[in-house]
Image (cartoon, grey):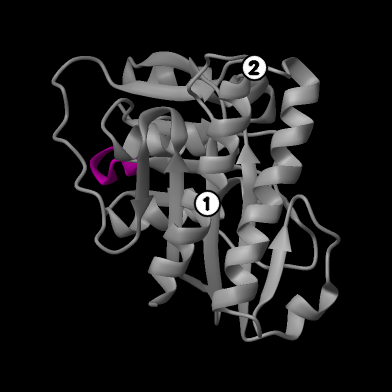
Amino acid sequence: MRDVEVAAAAARAAAAVLTGLREEGRLTGRALGDAGDAAAQAAIARVLAEQRPDDAVFSEEAVDDRRRLTADRVWIVDPLDGTREYGEAPRPDWAVHVALWRAGELPAAAVALPALGEVLVTDPAPVVPPPGGGRPRIAVSRSRPPAVAATAAAALDAELVPMGSAGWKVTAVVRGEADAYVHAGGMYQWDSAAPVAVARAAGLTAVRLDGSALAYNGPDAWLPDLLVCRPELADRLLAAVRPGSQPLT
């Protein structure tokens, strides 16, 4: 199996157990989310252990094995991105992330969107639909939208669209349901590695809010901010959200 096929197989395995657990109806809320986290982690670990037993794994739901910092190949995994949304059935806005890090790059990744029955991968890359023609739409957190998103919206006369998990918001841009995703206030590397890889493969811009490159498999799992957008909007958005900058008109 190619690396992207391994990523997709792992994401599908987690999606299947998550969907089954939710459909059973025995658990709800936090209990369902906790059970989902554990079950999805186990499903992904089984696939990676079978297909890539020598690779390191950096997962939200596992102890951080610091050997990953000197490993040649590291799988960055979020078994259930959007645990809260998953626990609020029938909310659809949650995802499964599986990405391969190698030599500072993310050459293969898959994002499962179980509520849609879809798995987006880096190869073949998704085709981003053309712009809708109306006001730009900026995806933001439904629970804690950052102030910088309002600044970006003002610069573009854009609409803010609240959504659930980070993976769902990034893939909303990939799927043409949003034109950008602006995030500040921090997240973890596994929250965005796989969605960013898929977005980049699809030709979208994915950078820090200051325009610098996103770095993964670092010693600190924290990632301060993120911008994913259509490339034609990148300059205007970055001008609006860079610290101390003035929006372009």
- Left or right: 135 as drawn, with respect to 150: left
Q: Which mark is residue 13?
A: 1
Q: Is residue 73 visible?
A: yes
Q: Which mark is residue 215?
A: none
Residue at (63% x, 30% y) in the render: 21
Q: Quadrant of residue 67?
A: bottom right
x and y percentages locating residue 115 in the rendered image = 44, 28
Task: Please tell me whether residue 231 belongs to the stretch shown in magenta.
Answer: yes
x and y percentages locating residue 36 in the rendered image = 69, 36
Point out the stretch of residues depicted in magenta.
Answer: 230-235
Give the residue type that dot 1 points to: Ala
Nearest the camera: 117 or 63? 117
x and y percentages locating residue 151 in the rendered image = 50, 21
- Left or right: 143 as drawn, with respect to 29: left
Residue at (52% x, 62% y) in the render: 99
Magenta region, mostly helix, strand or loop? helix
**46 shown above or below 12:** below
Task: Indicate the secondary structure of the residue bearing disc 1.
Answer: helix
**101 shown above or below 192:** below
Q: Check disc 2 and report the residue beneath it.
A: 25
Disc 2 and disc 1 in contact, CB within 8 angstroms: no
Crowdedness near tag 2: few (<14), some (14–19) or many (≥20) residues, C-alpha within 10 Å: few
Crowdedness near tag 1: few (<14), some (14–19) or many (≥20) residues, C-alpha within 10 Å: many
Nearest the camera: 240 or 126? 126
Q: Is residue 236 visible?
A: no
Give the residue type that dot 2 points to: Gly
Task: Indicate the secondary structure of the residue bearing disc 2.
Answer: loop
